[in-house]
Amino acid sequence: MTLYEIITKKKHNAELSTEEINWVVAGYTCGEIPDYQMSALLMAVCFNSLSDRETADLTMAMARSGDMLSPETGGFNADKHSTGGVGDKITLIAAPIAAACGIFVPKMSGRGLGHTGGTIDKLEAIPNFRTALPYDEFIGTVKKAGFAVASQTGTLVPADKKIYALRNATATVDSIPLICSSIMSKKLATGADGIVLDVKVGDGAFMKTAADAEKLASAMVRVGQLAGRKCSAVLTDMSKPLGMAVGNSLEVIEAIETLKGNVPEDSALREISLTLAAEMLVTAGKGDSEQCFAMAKKALSSGEALERLRQMIELQGGNSRVIEDYSLFGKARYSREVFASESGYLNGIACEETGLTALRLGAGRQTKESDIDPTAGIVFDKTVGDLVSNGERLAVLYSSAECDIDSIAADFVKVFDIGEEKKCGVKKNIIKIIKGY
Ligand code: URA
């Protein structure tokens, strides 16, 4: 077997055998296969795709390239994964809700990527919070609080680390089987019994159309099923920022406010959080979607989910007094208000540009090595569909970094699409649920 032959096969759109796929993943992970040959194969996959069987084989080979965990919590372990969005603080709400309903959520999360935020960066905005936990302590926290959130260890899915970095540098990221294997290898390696995928759709997401999002979601659910996991995917709207806050400490505060019951009942943030928590419960066999949604709602309104969050913060070394006293997060050094320059309906908020603005303010990384400013971000006063008056405040930008906040604020006005006519209609927060259980 040579990589030359395997590249030629894929170039001619022939199916690779399980043995060939295992050989490629093992050879590339240990450095025997050079980057230039792997890049050629990845490009051939981008053009000719992979069959369901090949995608499942690739995912399993990548998952097995490092530790395969099996969390010993003594109960049902569920996991959720978001494909990445703007203002996406769902894990901080859905995980404690699911935990309050009696299942375990051992969650390994990532940092922000490009214009999208990451749960680890958000949690590190809490004073003293630790995300790098020894595995025993991670499981101990899950057993006590029902959930824990830690950063991924270096021994988990090393194949993805290498392949992802190569894809990033060779324009081979946007391939559905490659995205599917990258995400699902990590989920399978962390050993959850139930996996719920939040597949974001729209301008602020990786998948810009519902058709592409559905293809990716179906591929991931199929792989999860083939690996014997209970798996479902929820397609959710990312055509506008999720909730009213974008940026690390600002999003933790909004998640706490949601768990305190202080956000509107019909908000996208609340509906999507409850739906994802409910889906985790469904994978655990707690009932059907409707029954589980009702359970999730009860855990939220009773305050039990908020208590789970408090417990998790304390067990991971954080100062849980932030729940009552938001000033403990620290205050941004600079702020700028942004005002409407005309009256009318707010028909849209450019979502990817909002994420990029938060990044420029310091909420994300411009380079891999950049530090995060936990105070940086945006709080909106208005949301899509609202009527606004000329001169009314639309948002406040925050930063402690030495960025040019005045020009960032001047540019930010352009993200708001205001018109005399209401054009935005009512967008569904939950576009579709693909069930694989
Ligand atoms: N997130 C991942 O983990 N991998 C991808 O390929 C894309 C998004």
Image (cartoon, grey):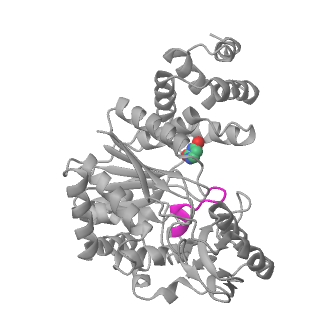
Q: Is residue 254 above or below residue 65?
A: below
- Across and down, in percent, residue 236 comes to 46, 54
Regarding ligand 1, which quadrant of the image does it lie in? top right
- Find residue 389 and report its image quarter: bottom right
Residue at image coords 70%, 74%: 361
| Whether residue 140 can be seen here | no
| Front-lying residue, 361 or 176 | 176
Residue at image coords 73%, 25%: 40
- Find residue 221 and report its image quarter: top left
| Front-lying residue, 80 or 421 | 421
Q: Is residue 399 above or below residue 88?
A: below
Q: Is residue 217 left or right of residue 413?
A: left
| Whether residue 55 can be seen here | yes
Q: Is residue 235 above or below residue 405?
A: above
- Across and down, in percent, residue 330 comes to 57, 85
| Quarter placement of the N terminus | top right
- Across and down, in percent, residue 124 comes to 53, 70
Region in magenta: 113-122
Q: Is residue 189 left or right of residue 333?
A: left
Number of numbered discs: 0
Q: Is residue 68 above or below residue 32?
A: below
- Across and down, in percent, residue 428 comes to 44, 58
Which secondary structure dominates the residues rendered in magenta? Answer: loop
- Find residue 112 and report its image quarter: bottom right
In the rendered image, the residue lying farthest to the front is: 421
Residue at image coords 63%, 40%: 164
| Quarter placement of the C terminus | top left
Residue at image coords 65%, 74%: 418
Q: Is residue 76 magenta?
A: no
| Front-lying residue, 215 or 91 | 215
| Front-lying residue, 280 or 322 | 280
